[in-house]
Amino acid sequence: MILLVYDADCGICQKAVEKLQIWVPNKFKVRASSNQLTEKIKETMDVVIEPELYMYLINLKTMQIYRGYDAFREVFSLGTRTRFLYYMMRAPLVPFLGRIVYRLIANNRRRLSGPGAKCGI
């Protein structure tokens, strides 16, 4: 089972998850983040949750966790129509640049989501 955990209080996260569910249907389960879920992930998988990344893809079979940009890339690998994006996102220099762009968006998430956005795992 593959689980995508995201910040439900963030407008950008909500829109991104909605699009991912359309582009890659029925390949992963979606859970809105909560303190209880985050603590369970930390305990079970012995990982550090970085609040500024806001989106995690967890493969519960292999116990692998992908964060931020890498979570998007791995979701694209699940769909037949989006697999080309997965390969593009693995090309030389693209992951480096993609992680920078993801961080810029993540760091400005509250401002970009609009007034009243809480944005925080």
Image (tube, rainbow, N blue to C red):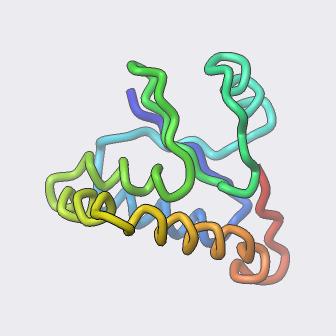
Q: Is residue 97 left or right of residue 94?
A: right
The residue shown at (15%, 53%) is: 80
The mark tally for this picture is 0
Quadrant housing residue 8: bottom right
Quadrant of the snapshot with the N terminus: top left
- Farthest residue toward the front? 92
Which residue is nearer to you in this view: 83 or 97? 97
The relative height of residue 27 versus residue 118 in the rendered view (above or below) is above
The relative height of residue 2 versus residue 72 in the rendered view (above or below) is above
Residue 30: x and y in percent read: 50, 43
- Farthest residue toward the left? 80
Residue 17: x and y in percent read: 49, 59
Which residue is nearer to you in this view: 106 or 28? 106
Q: Is residue 108 left or right of residue 67?
A: right
The relative height of residue 23 versus residue 1 in the rendered view (above or below) is below
The residue shown at (43%, 56%) is: 72
Quadrant housing residue 39: top right
Residue 119: x and y in percent read: 77, 62
The relative height of residue 66 versus residue 118 in the rendered view (above or below) is above
The residue shown at (30%, 55%) is: 76
The residue shown at (43%, 29%) is: 59
